[in-house]
Image (cartoon, rainbow, N blue to C red):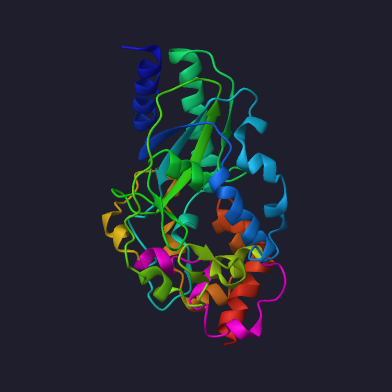
Amino acid sequence: MSDTKTYTDLIKAEANRLGFLATGISKVCFLKEDEAWIKKWLSNNMHGEMHYMENYPDKRLDPRLLVENSLSVISLLYNYFPPTLQFNPDSFKIARYAYGTDYHQVVKNKIFSLMSFINTHVTKVNGRVFVDSAPVLERAWARKSGLGWIGKNTNLINPRHGSFFFIGELIIDLELEYDQPVNNHCGTCTRCMDACPTGAITEPYVIDARKCISYLTIELKDKIPEKWKGKISPWIFGCDACQEACPWNKKAKPHHEPEFIPVTELLNLSKKDWENLSENKFLELFSKSAIKRTKYSGLKRNINFLSSH
């Protein structure tokens, strides 16, 4: 057995032990096939106020500019599908990924553990860990690594697990065995497009972020435009509508990550509780959550927008 095969098997076994849903590995290269759609998407201003999307286009397309002499992109999926949803069906809703502790740190720590394992038990490497925090095209690398296909809602869909997972990467200067992409299985299905309350999926595989509820409730810093009144309810942070509609998510199984379990009080909040949310209670409930990104003022803006319409 070659060293490359041995190293690959050891890394995938350890990733599995650490709790990752799946691991795929790609050879580092320039993402030529993704260059055109990114340029078109940006030129059509579909990124809205997310101006950081315009930065470092070269690094987004070539990991060798992020990690010198890198050879492999290890893509990893980490489940966040919750065992329990918000209890009150008439309450405001938050996206499931934000139920527990901020995923950036939880998943990043797992990948750092994998990096440490490689250096200790496989071979010495140089590399960097990425979890939604640098100019890395996560879905593109996961697709190249055989972890799924890009659905019409632009999420990565895994044939065994659906799409309720985070994607992280470990880019290293070690040659490994590389996985092959899988076929797209969306077919003629348009359930995600039909389910989007604001029509943000303007055509298959294209999202206009300016219309996306996740963008409107998280990324947009100004007032939410009045034209969305009656459209974004009940979502006050993020949105799961397109994922809930996707038939592949019937395969999603609850996660086993203690850090992602929300406090019962959060699941119990009624619409009135949200409307009366104080800043102290916000800090108590969301001090470790991704929701803190909106700050208290941002979440109250979203709640007030829904309450007044």
Instruction: Residue at 62%, 57% (x, y): give it.
Output: 292
Instruction: Residue at 61%, 34% (x, y): give it.
Output: 63
Residue located farthest toward the bottom when viewing the structure as drawn: 309
- Residue 262 shown left or right of residue 220 in the figure: left
Pick whichever, 131 or 60, lies toward us: 60
In the rendered image, is residue 134 in sight? no
| Residue 75 picture location, percent across and down | 46, 37
Pick whichever, 262 or 175, lies toward us: 175
Residue 228 painted magenta: yes
| Residue 284 picture location, percent across and down | 58, 57
* 268 lies above or below 168: below
Residue 133 painted magenta: no
Give the image quarter of residue 182.
Answer: top left
Pick whichever, 123 or 41, lies toward us: 41
Give the image quarter of residue 22.
Answer: top left
Q: Which residues are magenta?
A: 220-245
- Residue 106 shown left or right of residue 192 in the figure: right
* 2 lies above or below 94: above
